[in-house]
Image (cartoon, grey):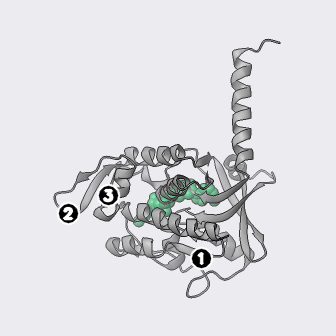
Amino acid sequence: MSHSLENVVSTTIVSGFANKLLNNLQVDVAVVGAGPSGLVAAKTLADKGLKVAVFERKLAPGGGVWGGGMLFNEVVVQEEAKAIVDEFNVNARPIQAAQGYYAVDSVELASALVYGATHAGATIFNAISVEDVAFSGERVCGLVVNWTPVERLGMHVDPLVVLTKAVLDGTGHPCEVLTMVQNKARVKLDTPTGQILGERPMQAATGEISTVENTREYYPGIFASGMSANNVMGGYRMGPIFGGMLLSGKKAAALIERSVRLL
Ligand code: 48H
């Protein structure tokens, strides 16, 4: 039987995606949110040979990078994170008025982070939302996922489950995964109150430091990075400075790699 081009294209896309999904129903690390911290963590973990899947609610991965500051598509990165900017082959222009700080085109940074993570071997599933977590005893063992349009339209469609050895909550300001764990599983998180402390107002330099400090495991199997980590531990926000997000991704990757290899 001869196949029309239309049929070959459709068959290729369906089988390609089906294989990708089948291959990622059990992973080493599941990253929730393709923002800067999640993408740096995904690339770093994939570089180490771990199987990494990233689930991103939006059609376009990249999180809050694209929008720069108030839609002016530029962001700022500090010296401590310059090596990560270089690792992703992104141009950085020194800022004369603030020594040790660089200006970066946010579209270049967002696209480089997405390419870097996928090229290293992480698989990004876009337009898929994490709506719940799966537990095995006292440890989180999986993510409950569904199509974002299903979520947005409020359709009554049951989800699928992706099993994983570790979850990274890289969902940004709302820290969605740890919120689910706190509210639905009703367990205590590893914070001073056992609960999410809530993000504080802007204090840029402090927020940059706390983002990295707050990057760690908050419940067995669940780590938080970026603004999610700041929300959980009551850290300050910092506006369009992104070095802390990149450094947080690196720290999360190192902690997760150690944890996964010990299992
Ligand atoms: C699937 C989800 C879900 C879900 C959310 O916000 P992000 O860019 O994440 P970070 O923390 O790496 O970077 C934060 C930075 O962008 C920022 O907001 C800064 C620096 N703010 C400072 C300030 O003062 O405001 O990306 C998170 C991603 C987004 O793309 C979401 O769509 C996605 O996570 N996401 N994906 N399932 N349940 N929840």
Q: Which residue is mark 2?
A: 98
Residue 31 in sight from this viewpoint: yes
Quadrant of the frame with the N terminus: top right
Q: Position of residue 174 (x, y in %)?
A: 56, 66
Q: Which residue lies at the image location 42% right of the left edge and 60% below the top edge?
A: 246
In the rendered structure, which amino acid carries the disc numbered 1?
Answer: Tyr
Report the front residue among 160 and 156: 160
Q: Which residue lies at the image location 50% right of the left edge and 72% below the top edge?
A: 215
Report the front residue among 202 and 6: 6
Quadrant of the rendered structure where residue 133 is? bottom right
Taking the view exactly as shown, the residue that stands out farthest to the left is 96
Q: Which residue is mark 1?
A: 218
In the rendered structure, which amino acid carries the disc numbered 3?
Answer: Lys
Vertical comparison of 104 with 242: above or below = above
Q: Are marks 2 and 1 in contact (CB under 8 Å)?
A: no
Q: Earlier in the sequence, mark 2 or mark 1?
A: 2
In the rendered structure, which amino acid carries the disc numbered 2?
Answer: Ala
Q: Nearer the viewer, mark 3 or mark 1?
A: 3
Q: Secondary structure at mark 1?
A: strand
Residue 69 in sight from this viewpoint: no
Q: Position of residue 71 (x, y in %)?
A: 38, 50
How packed mark 2 is, by other alpha carbons closer than 10 Å (few <14, some 14-19, many 20 or more), is few
Q: Secondary structure at mark 3?
A: helix
Q: CA distance from mark 3 to mark 1?
A: 28 Å
Q: Which residue lies at the image location 46% right of the left edge and 55% below the top edge?
A: 64
- Number of labels in the image equals 3
Q: Which residue is mark 3?
A: 82
